[in-house]
Structure formats: C-alpha cells, structure tokens
Image: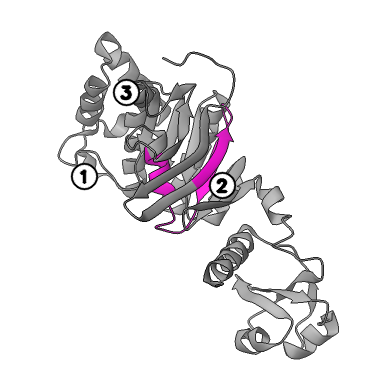
Amino acid sequence: MARTADGPAISAAALTMRFGSFTAVQDVSFDVSPGEIFGFLGPNGSGKSTVIRMLCGLLRPSEGSGHILGMDSSREAESVKRSIGYMSQKFSLYPDLTVHENLSFYGRIYGLGRRLHERMDAVVKQLHLAPYVQRRAGALSGGWKQRLALACALLHEPRVMFLDEPTAGIDPVARRELWDFLYELAGRGVTLFVTTHYMDEAERCNRLGYIYLSRMLLLGTPDELKADPRVTPDSARWYEAGLDGVEPPLEKLGKQEGISDVTVFGNTLHLLADSRVSQPQLTELAGGLEFREGAPTLEDVFVRLTRLAEQQRRQP
C-alpha cells in the first residue's frame, strides 16, 4: 500500500539501465504529480519501454531509483505491481474468451474476491461495454478492443496507469472517445503515464518528456517545449504560407542558405529561416507564395532537438 498521498505519484531519480556494455537508459529523472497526464515520447529504441519496466518493478535499474506512490519500484516491486494498471500497445487479452470472461479472468488475477462482480459491472458501465459482454474479444473492432483492455487494467482501481500507445491502430472517433475517458480518469485523481507517437495526443498531455538514445532531452509543458531557445534561435523565425493546391517547392527552399526544417502540414508550407532571409525573399523563392510569421509545432520541437542531439553524438 502507498504510505502517503503527498509528493509525486511517479518519480524517477537518475534512472540508468545497462545490458552488458550497452546503456539503454542513462540518468533519466522526472516527477509526475497525482492526477497528471504525463506524455512520454521518443523514437522506437530510445529507452521508453525500459524506463517503464524499471518504474513498474519489472527491471532493477543499474543505477538510480524509481518510486510509485512512495514505494520503491525495486525493493517493493510486488506492492508497486498491485497499485498500477498497465495497458499495452498491442491487444494482449484472450481473443477466444468473451468480454465478460476476460474481465472475470483478470479480476481473479487481481484477487478482487467478493468485489469482482461489483468492479466488473462498474467498468462495463464506465466504458459502455454492456452490448458486447458476450462477444468474443477477438471479434471486437480495434476501438472496442482498446476499451476492453482499459477496462481490464482498471478493475482493481489503480491510482497510477501506464498506457503504451493506447490508441495505436484505431480510428479518429475511437481515439477521441478514449481520450475523453482518460480525461475523466485524471479528473478523479488517477495519474496517467502515456506513450504516443501522435502529436495531437502529445498536445493533450499536461507535461511531456522526450527521450532520445537513452537520455531525456526535454521535459515540460507543450508550450514550454515550443519556447525552448534551441527550437527557435534568436536570429531565426518560423514562417507559414498557404499552398492552395500549389506544389510546394520543398527541394529549392531546403537548399537555400539560411532556411531549414522545411515541411508541409496539410495545406500549409512551414519553415524556419534565419535573419539572412527576409519575407519578400521567401515569397520570391517560393514562386509568389505569401508568408506570415508562424510558430513551432511539437513535431518541430522533437525533430530539431533530435537533430541537435545527433550532431553532438557524431562530434569527435
């Protein structure tokens, strides 16, 4: 049981994990407050899963420590596991069992005893699963599979939830509905630790951490990350131009000295230019497109910081 309601719900202090000569996670530190939605981002292989496994008590760190609700993830691993919920990126329940049978099975694993049917009824109602309780899990659509997985993870009423790309592979409507429910959970004081590759989902998080090649590069709110001076140097500005069906001159602009990070978002050309390039010059280079000053997106943040980290790594 957690010994205190004070302090962070999740805490990582200089977490480091080595596998032989390979360092998977290096000196990662952060805190997550109770009821916070914390987004944990990074490319595949960056160390995200290893951090989660250390926090959940599945891996003992080589150095540093992790705490969940005041419990040491290494020394009190079994208590930690009983206090958290985990929802995997891949559907990990039993496809040949019905929704009801999956819930019953996981409820018994959690040792709910006499509270099993009460909790099953509660999560079925919360996630609107009633029409599907007798349907085989394998016959559900992607969105309803994710709802079932979340329902199973919530049966024992955990105060901390780890969600590994919870909306991967489901349609936009199901994604929005799932996020609406996650907001409800956070409103009840449940702490959510979410990994995602979707930038719109990252914007929904209270705070974000970005890990790359084992190290935490960024930590803060979405607005704080966008304001990082490494993303927009003092001598540079972000610009945007509507395309209106015009073919974007990406290659030409990308080769122009003083212009970097040229990309397209929907029907908008988006780039970073330093003081050597004026707005009229941009218009001329882009064949008459009218530019206005813009702002960095979260995607810009992660792309630029990743490039800077890669440049530093390659330096002798």
Residue 190 is situated, as x and y percent measured from the top left of the image, at 51, 26
User: In the rendered view of the protein, which quadrant contains the C terminus?
Assistant: bottom right
In the rendered structure, which amino acid carries the disc numbered 2? Gly
C-alpha separation, residue under disc 2 versus residue under disc 3: 26 Å
Tag 1 and tag 2, C-beta contact below 8 Å: no
Q: Nearer the viewer, residue 65 or 271?
A: 65
Q: Nearer the viewer, residue 64 or 251?
A: 64
Q: Which residue is mark 2?
A: 209
Q: Is residue 150 visible?
A: no
Q: Nearer the viewer, mark 1 or mark 2?
A: 2
Q: Which residue is mark 3?
A: 78
Q: Which residue is mark 1?
A: 138
Badge 1 local density, few (<14 within 10 Å), some, or many (20+)?
A: some
Q: 125 above or below 27?
A: above
Q: Nearer the viewer, residue 149 or 304?
A: 304
User: In the rendered view of the protein, which quadrant contains the N terminus?
Assistant: top left
Is residue 29 a member of the stretch shown in magenta? Answer: yes
Q: Which label's residue is closer to the chain start, 2 or 3? A: 3
Residue for point 36% across, 56% down:
22
Going by the image, does 288 lie left or right of 72?
A: right
Q: Is residue 110 visible?
A: yes
Kind of element beneath mark 3: helix
Q: Nearer the viewer, residue 154 or 74?
A: 74
Residue for point 37% across, 39% down:
53
Q: Which label's residue is closer to the chain start, 1 or 2? A: 1
